[in-house]
Image: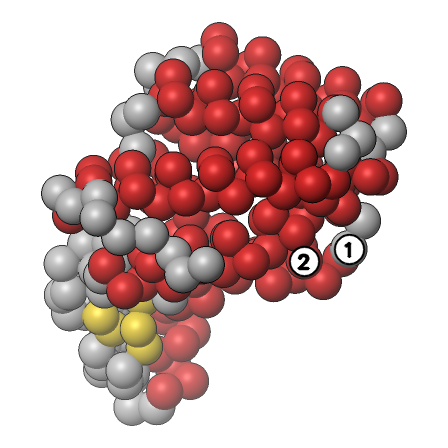
Amino acid sequence: MNHEYGATSLNVFTSASTAATPAAGRNAHSALGLTPLVAEGFVLFESARRTVVRRLTPTDVKELFELREALEVYAAGLAASRATPEALAELRELLTSAAAGAGDAETITDVNTRFHDRILALAGNSLLIAVMEPVDGRLRWLTRRNEEWPQLLTEHRELYEAIASGDPDRARAHALSHVRANYESTVRHLFGDDSGRPAS
């Protein structure tokens, strides 16, 4: 069976499609590796016999970036006030890895995720991490569709420099600019429209 994040809705029938109970269907999903997709909102469990792989809509993307704007901007400000020299060195290493892997979607996606995860960790608030974890898969999928790698790397460098400055206001401003620019780029690549942006 093949499935992909954001694919057109379809029915997924498995060897357990004759299962008579929802629990049996959920067990089949686990065996097929669908459980993370269900948790991340890409797969909808409707019954023991029917599972729908859903496409991200413009509203879905807008809501994801509104969440990013609310949490990542706040986290960047905390990171600027709490980051140690060792932690900043780790962020620099990630920027170096991103530059070396420019043009490779999987490498960029991985480094992008690790960069933002590290900023959340530097914020020193475990609840921020817990809130972002359920949407991590969707954000990784969106990153793979964004081919504007040079711009992404430039924004990450600027965000790093803002955090390294120790100025929370500067860090929050750069984080806000980064999230909004990334949103517009994502909408443009997915839907051919860059007119929207998350609510302020």
**In percent of the image, x 44 and y 14: which residue is there?**
101
Amino acid on which disc 2 is placed: Leu
Q: In the shown orientation, is residue 43 left or right of residue 30?
A: left
Quadrant in the rendering for residue 157: top right
- In this rendering, the answer to whether 49 lies above or below 131 is below
Q: In the shown orientation, is residue 109 left or right of residue 81?
A: left
The residue that label 1 is drawn on is 125
Q: In the shown orientation, is residue 71 left or right of residue 65?
A: right
Q: Which of these two is toward me, 145 or 185? A: 185
Number of disc labels: 2
Residue sticking out furthest to the bottom: 20
Residue 14: x and y in percent read: 23, 67
- In this rendering, the answer to whether 19 lies above or below 133 is below
Q: In the shown orientation, is residue 37 left or right of residue 81?
A: left
Residue 156: x and y in percent read: 54, 26
**In percent of the image, x 42 and y 74: which residue is there?**
27
**In percent of the image, x 38 and y 17: which residue is there?**
150
Amino acid on which disc 1 is placed: Asn
Quadrant in the rendering for residue 168: top right
Residue 163: x and y in percent read: 71, 31
At label 1, counting other C-alpha atoms closer than 10 Å, the crowd grade (few under 14, some 14-19, many 20 or more) is: few
Residue 79: x and y in percent read: 75, 40
The residue that label 2 is drawn on is 128
Secondary structure of the residue carrying tag 2 is helix
In this orientation, does residue 48 appear?
Answer: yes
- In this rendering, the answer to whether 25 lies above or below 151 is below
For the N terminus, the quadrant is bottom left
Secondary structure of the residue carrying tag 1 is loop
Say if mark 2 contacts mark 1, CB within 8 Å.
Answer: yes
At label 2, counting other C-alpha atoms closer than 10 Å, the crowd grade (few under 14, some 14-19, many 20 or more) is: some
